[in-house]
Image (cartoon, rainbow, N blue to C red):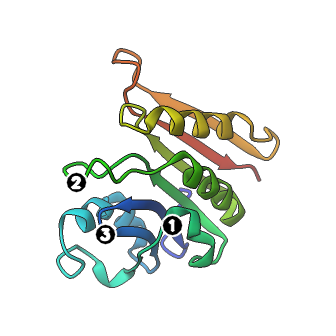
Amino acid sequence: MIIQSMHTKLNGVARLGHLGVIRVEGADAASFLHNQLTQDFSLLGLSEARLADMVTLVHTGHEEMQQHVNGPVKAVLFNLGYLPGGDHSIITRPETTGVALLHSLKLLATGGIVMVTVYPGHGGGVGEKQTVDDWAAGLEPRQYHSWRMGQMNVISDAPYCILIQKAA
């Protein structure tokens, strides 16, 4: 298991409603990630979300994560695009996502992962898709393992995931 309860995790989600960078610590942090509390915080207030006492919300963009998180971290998760049910004009952008992806590698522990969920179907999605794909394909293969996962029998602008693991 890559993530264990004593590790620091980072969810690099930006400009989705009131949500910025999330830093998670504590004995139950792994279950926090499994329960996808990011969506809870987007839909509920901080005091209403499960395990809210383990989380520090920082109202900033994901490109600023290095200012708020000390490495090394075992996982960095990006959920790009816009908040479902939210204002579709508030989106992640290629220029800030590119910076955030570079920062995520600097924070990543050996054996750690970066997972990026890409939504190319939104207004800025094509440019962001190109930024993410170019970044992942250009990583040094002796330092990082890079995978792309997506459903094959759907429209071409369907969401997909990029998974990066820092080699030992």
Classify mark 2: helix, strand or loop: loop
Label 2 with label 3: CB-CB less than 8 Å: no
In the image, 107 versus 86, the foreground residue is: 86
Sort mark 2 into few (<14), some (14-19) or many (20+) by Cα contacts within 10 Å. Answer: few
**Picture quarter containing residue 147?**
top right
Query: CA–CA distance between discs 2 and 1?
Result: 23 Å
Comparing marks 2 and 1, which lies closer to the viewer?
2
Sort mark 1 into few (<14), some (14-19) or many (20+) by Cα contacts within 10 Å. Answer: many
The residue where tag 1 is placed is 10
Indicate the amino acid at tag 3: His
Q: Is residue 36 depicted above or below 66 in this figure?
A: above
Q: Is residue 76 depicted above or below 154 in this figure?
A: below
Q: Residue at x 24, y 78 (%)?
A: 46
In the image, 162 versus 100, the foreground residue is: 100
Q: Position of residue 144 (x, y in %)?
A: 73, 45
Q: Residue at x 23, y 64 (%)?
A: 40
Indicate the amino acid at tag 2: Gly
| First reached walking from the N terminus: tag 3 or tag 1 | 1
Sort mark 3 into few (<14), some (14-19) or many (20+) by Cα contacts within 10 Å. Answer: few
Q: Position of residue 72 (x, y in %)?
A: 67, 70
Classify mark 1: helix, strand or loop: strand
| First reached walking from the N terminus: tag 2 or tag 1 | 1
Q: Position of residue 27 (x, y in %)?
A: 43, 79
Comparing marks 3 and 1, which lies closer to the viewer?
3
Indicate the amino acid at tag 1: Leu
Classify mark 3: helix, strand or loop: loop
Label 2 with label 1: CB-CB less than 8 Å: no
Q: Position of residue 35 (x, y in %)?
A: 30, 60
Disc assigned to residue 18: 3
The residue where tag 2 is placed is 86
